[in-house]
Amino acid sequence: MMFNLSRIKHYEQVFYNKYYPPTVINRVKSRKLNKNKDFSLLCANCMGGIICHQLDTPFLSPTVNLMILQPDFYHLVLNLNEYLDSEFVEIPPQECPRGDLDGVVVNFTHYNTFNEGVSAWKRRCKRINFDNLWIIATDRDGVTEEDIASLQHVPCKGLLVFTAKKYDYPYCFQLKQFESQGQIGDILQQTIYGKRYFELYFDYVKWLNSDDKVVEHFRLRD
């Protein structure tokens, strides 16, 4: 009998996410500490879905279960209302269905078809809580300091940019271990502590429950 490696990895992830004791403990603690139940979180990758699942909060964001390259994600959040009114055009898939949203390429990573992804996007666009809007970005995919600086005027409740380099913007959170790489690496990887890598350094629960704009105040370790 041949082993299906992808299926084995799938079951490993299911076990880690649902049944691994440290993960369960972390999830219970996080939900008890969280008081912010109706936030909308814009992210360019699976982090938004991970956080919402962890806190048992509804998906009030169209970017859940999607992947968008960071430069396109910056364009999206800088012109959010315009993009929310735009229509998708289907483009050839690359490992998953994809759509072009007026120049922003959206990878529907957790959807079987283009139409399924677009339907979920439109449904969740209607749920956005603009009074409780949070954004998480990174410095990947060729993002420049000019790009990072452009986010300072984006209207939102909270803004966080994980960076490899040190920047003097209150919303930038440096992870020094990636400094030699020039950009943030995989911060969604699972750890033996039942937390994703970024959770070891950044207290996102306390951040989502605070009005403090300085993200360094939520650092857990250097």
Image (tube, grey):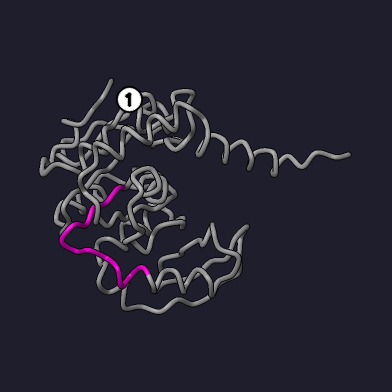
Q: Is residue 58 above or below residue 216?
A: below
Dividing the picture into quarters, in which one does residue 72 lie? bottom left
- Quarter of the image for the N terminus: give it: top right
Residue 36: % across, % down: 21, 48
Q: Specify start and end residues of the magenta stretch as a single range.
A: 124-136
Q: Position of residue 215 (x, y in %)?
A: 19, 36
Is 95 on the left or on the right of 212, as rendered?
right
Q: Which residue is mark 1?
A: 176
- The quadrant of the picture occupied by the C terminus is top left
Left or right of 14 on screen, residue 122:
left
**Going by the image, does 197 lie left or right of 202?**
right
Q: Residue at x 49, y 77 (%)?
A: 89
Image coordinates for residue 29, horizontal then vertical, percent: 31, 32
Q: Is residue 12 magenta?
A: no
User: SS of the residue at dot 1?
Assistant: helix
Name the residue: 22% across, 63% down.
Answer: 129
The tally of labels here is 1
Residue drawn 29% across and 54% down?
A: 41
In the image as oriented, which residue stretches furthest toward the right?
1
Nearer-the-camera pick, 216 or 111: 111
Compared to residue 34, the image places residue 109 above or below, namely below
Type of the residue with mark 1: Lys
Whether 128 is among the magenta residues is yes
Q: Residues within 10 Å of mark 1 (few under 14, many from 20)?
A: some
* Point 21% across, 57% down: residue: 133
**Residue 123 at x, y = what percent?**
38, 72
